[in-house]
Image (tube, coloured by chain):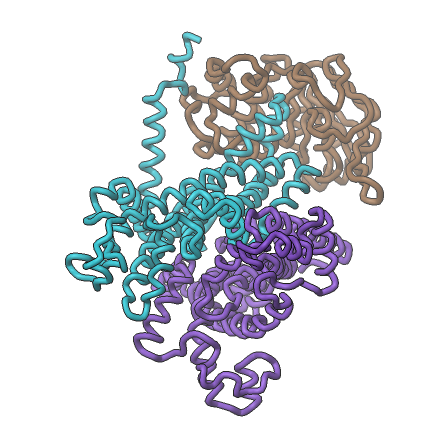
Amino acid sequence: MIEVENLEVAFGKGDDRKQVVKSVSFKVAKGETLGIVGESGCGKSTVLRSLAGLDRHWTGRIALAGQDVAKERTKQQFELAQMVFQDPYGSIHPRHRIERVLAELLRAMQRGEGWDRVVPALERVGLPAAFAERFPHELSGGQRQRVAIARALMLAPQILLLDEPTSALDVSVQAEVLNLLSDLREEQQLTYVLVSHDLSVIAHMCDRVLVMKEGVFVDELTPEAFRGGEITQAYSKTLFEASFL
Amino acid sequence: MKEFNFKELGQRFVQLLVSLFILLLVTFVIGRVLPTDPVGAIVGELADPAAFEAMRQRLGLDLPLYQQFWIYVTSLLHGDMGTAILTGNPVTQDLASAFPATLELATLAVIISTVVGVPLGMAAALYRDTLIDQIARVISLVGHSIPVFWFGIVGLVIFYAGLSRVGGPGRVDIYLEGLVEPRTGLLLVDSLLAGDMEVFWNAVSHIILPACIPAYSAMAYITRMTRSFTLEQLNQDYVTAARQGRVLGGHCHRAYPAQYFGAAGDHSRHFLWQPAGRRGGHRDRVLSARYRPIHDQCADDWRHECRARLDADHWPDLHAAQFRGGPRLCLP
Amino acid sequence: MSNVETLPGRGGFGRLFGRMATTVRLSLSKLSREPLGMVGFIVLAVLVIVAIFAPWIAPYSPTAQNLPQALQAPSWAHWAGTDEFGRDILSRLIHGTRITIQTVLAVTLIVGPVGLIVGVVAGFVGGRTDAILMRATDIVLSFPSLIPALAFAAAMGAGLQTAIIAISLTGWPPIARLARAEALVVRNTDYVAAARLYGASPLRILFLYIAPMCIPSVVVRLTLNMAGIILTAAALGFLGLGAQPPAPEWGAMISNGRKFMLDYWWVAVMPGPAILITSLAFNLVGDALRDLLDPRHVRS
């Protein structure tokens, strides 16, 4: 579903040039959930943003659903992959009602008014239809993240890119949102790339985990290895211990 | 505090030069494109065509516009601001004669506004949401809203005409004029140096009203700013800690100077001194096309502004931040 | 689409009106906790009413001369006295509100959109566009606001329109600066990133996502600016560059009264409170609006 070859990302020019991602390659199969873990600043979010088409500083090759994509995406390519952001307080326009937030995608894509698609989209993520009229500030963090997920699914993408989707939420709400994501994946045969520094989230969700450090992948783990604590690579071990001890 | 950055300073300097050039160009164009006729104003409407043409040539008005502009800029760079077309005095001389009075007035106004505004603002912040705060707020709001030219008239009517407590137009009463040797040009200083207390107190009575009135407008800004900066500092933990035993003055004041410069820059235009009773003179002068001095006064005003802005460092960011933070540091 | 009407969130004007009523009610209840702001709003409302109904409210004609009644001190017949032509000053002040409100509205309608667009475009597009626009803004900002007005009046002839254009010419840069600062923040938010991901065009992002976020602070700023506009307009009138006689412009009335100020003080003094109160009301309303519209701002 996703193929990445020799992806490099660098920001700045001349002396200020900073290489954030150093030649990484990976593949994600359809229906699979790939986890990427690492400390903050290791480049994991940058990989995700390059996949989504937000960062345009990359070189290498990215293919989504068997189709090579350029730095500038076409509308059809945007429909392949959508992203859920970390902070549900910042990722929804504060002055748009929820109905507008959801309908905007179809309107921007010039696929009609989109109002009729709002209620089904809300119901899909377990929110009542009445929420369509509310403003984001009238919703809780968990509810907002559900709206963000509903928005990401609006264009029926095959790939969902999740950037720390639960780290801004209360612990009690985190489980609900993760379960929702699991259910949606089953229902709609979605492919996920999940970036997190929370190893328990990764262990819960992922079929495969890549450990990232300073712009390269240093280890690849199975969730079984994760849960059993059978980790051999030194850096993964430190990360693991720091997180669970 | 930000590190001193020479590269940035250089960039700012270049920006300043570009802005200055464009400003000169714009003022020049405005000045030259005006349909008013400076030649006619000097030689008179009914002068014969030969005299008219001679004056046109003397003023350089027969040259192409870009040449006139070149002459204008080069002579400015040589410190020659030209001759005021109407009075025939060199503009530098006109400016020089007005400058000490302006300086004296502005200094006094800045002192008054600071001496009153800072304590008032601090008191308002310390006693936030109490009667003191409300009073300070009303005082500063009125200061923002009052038309200065009207306030001056009211001042004159009450204190000069009504109570005879202050001097009227001029820097001293006529019978005292020219008694003191002009050493610095600042009459208050000169009279003290000469030891002539009569002239000194007379000058004080003449300057106090013109200084207080623009000072009130400036004070309105200063009070507001002081209040919000003090609040900001009070909210920081170290002051909260220090507050237990110490006065906050020393802590809070480090952050102020740059912003004060900004305020002073804003208000410098209120302080431009003109001979009393000629406040409306601007108009007459423009309308009679005495336009060189306007350029220069404009450029001069502008230099004030730029200096204030350089001092206030990162003005645009400050601007946005301060809008959120409360006081409005901006040009009216 | 026919099924649109049955869906929640879509409705005709009735629903829209209901939403607006709720917003207004909420704002009013917030405002009632802000007595000074309330006073400002009331004063402004009164001023607007006075401006609209000036001919019916004013006891005398603002321009009819009555020389035997010249320079009368304030009395029951003439509350604010009469000027050198025997015109009732109060009536002139009442008619003057029209000129003032007109000036303020016209300048705001020019300055607001221009400043907003320049600032938002500069902030959103960035790069060279930003540099050029902001340089232009800086240069305009460095003009003392009276100078272009003087030049303008000399070039085009003094008058109300000249004054409006002149004030507008130097009035937009602060708005542009503010809008740019806001746009710079909004440009980098996740919701704009999300909009990019669903292919929203730059224009769509600019007008539907960024500009609406800048409007509240621009409105607050404009209201506070109105106070300054009144002062500048009065100053231009004072210098004889605003509305021309016999129009009852407040600044011009003060200037006119200067000639008799030592003997007949009321001619010069009376228009002052009108300017002061109007300007003060705009300042109060601006402060109150800031509290209402800008939730990030804690009053200081």
Counting from the top left corner in percent of width and height, residue C283 is at: 40, 52
Q: Nearer the viewer, residue C255 or B155?
A: C255
Can residue C73 be seen?
yes
Q: Colour of chain B?
A: purple
* Horizontal arrangement in the rendering, residue B217 relative to residue C78 (left or right): right
The chain letter corresponding to cyan is C
Counting from the top left corner in percent of width and height, residue A107 is at: 54, 18
Note whether C119 is above or below C84 in the view shown. above
Q: Residue at x 61, y 17 (%)?
A: A185
Q: Residue at x 27, y 66 (%)?
A: C264
* Horizontal arrangement in the rendering, residue B134 relative to residue A221 (left or right): left
Q: Colour of chain A?
A: brown
| Residue B42 occupies quadrant | bottom right
Instruction: For the N terminus of chain C, give its image quadrant.
Output: top left
Counting from the top left corner in percent of width and height, residue C124 is at: 62, 35
Instruction: For the C terminus of chain C, give its image quadrant.
Output: bottom left
